[in-house]
């Protein structure tokens, strides 16, 4: 994270203990930024009636994360849709020029044109903000992009995306 806005946005989704840990770490690594962040957080409106962003419901610690969808890159969307429809029993949710979405029960498969987006996996985890520097998307979903040791793209989000 580079700016106060990045840290502030990130800190807004952390519970108080995690915010305190963030401030402690920043005090060691970047004391001026820590002071600016503490000042910004200190001026927050804390009345829940004025807070606009709904937080996802917490889950028990032993509940596993949920796979929302897998993204597969294809060379030809139309041919891929045809193949998936002929091969599997899935509901076609969307079919555009560069994207198609299928529902397999509560799980989705997204087909994207190779040039538009890399293949990957999207996992829902309400406490994504505790995993590291995540960002809020325009649709309100907080997400964190990771790459596993083998180069696979993984997006972790705090709630199912509104596709």
Image (cartoon, rainbow, N blue to C red):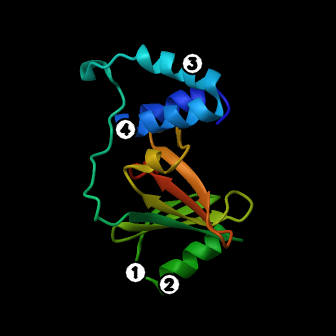
Question: Which numbered disc flags the more N-terminal residue, 4 or 1?
Answer: 4
Q: Residue beneath label 4, please? A: 17
Secondary element under disc 1, as helix, strand or loop, is loop
Residue at image coords 42%, 16%: 42
Q: Which label sits in the foreground, 3 or 1?
A: 3
Q: Is residue 13 visible?
A: no
Q: Is residue 56 above or below residue 122?
A: above
Q: Residue beneath label 1, please? A: 89
Q: Which label sits in the foreground, 4 or 2?
A: 4
The Cα–Cα distance between marks 3 and 4, rounded to whole angstroms, is: 19 Å
Mark 2, other Cα within 10 Å: few <14 / some 14–19 / many ≥20: few
Question: Which numbered disc flags the more N-terminal residue, 4 or 2?
Answer: 4
Q: Is residue 60 left or right of residue 16?
A: left
Question: Which numbered disc flags the more N-terminal residue, 3 or 4?
Answer: 4
Do the residues bearing badges 4 and 2 touch, measured as CB atoms within 8 Å?
A: no
Between residues 109 and 153, which one lies in front from this camera angle?
A: 153
Q: Quadrant of residue 112?
A: bottom right
Between residues 101 and 145, which one lies in front from this camera angle?
A: 145
Q: Residue beneath label 2, please? A: 86
The Cα–Cα distance between marks 3 and 1, rounded to whole angstroms, is: 54 Å
């Amino acid at each position: 994270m580079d700016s106060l806005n990045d840290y502030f946005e990130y800190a807004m989704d952390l519970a108080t203990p995690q915010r305190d840990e963030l401030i402690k770490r920043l005090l060691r690594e970047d004391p001026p930024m820590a002071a600016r962040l503490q000042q910004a957080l200190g001026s927050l409106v804390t009345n829940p009636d004025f807070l606009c962003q709904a937080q996802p419901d917490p889950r028990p610690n032993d509940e596993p994360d949920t796979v929302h969808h897998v993204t597969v890159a294809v060379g030809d969307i139309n041919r891929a849709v045809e193949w998936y429809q002929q091969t599997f029993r899935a509901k076609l949710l969307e079919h555009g020029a560069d994207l198609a979405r299928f529902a397999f029960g509560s799980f989705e498969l997204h087909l994207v044109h190779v040039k538009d987006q890399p293949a990957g996996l999207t996992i829902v985890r309400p406490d994504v903000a505790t995993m590291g520097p995540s960002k809020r998307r325009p649709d309100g979903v907080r997400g964190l992009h990771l790459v596993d040791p083998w180069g696979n793209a993984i997006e972790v989000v705090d709630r199912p995306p509104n596709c």
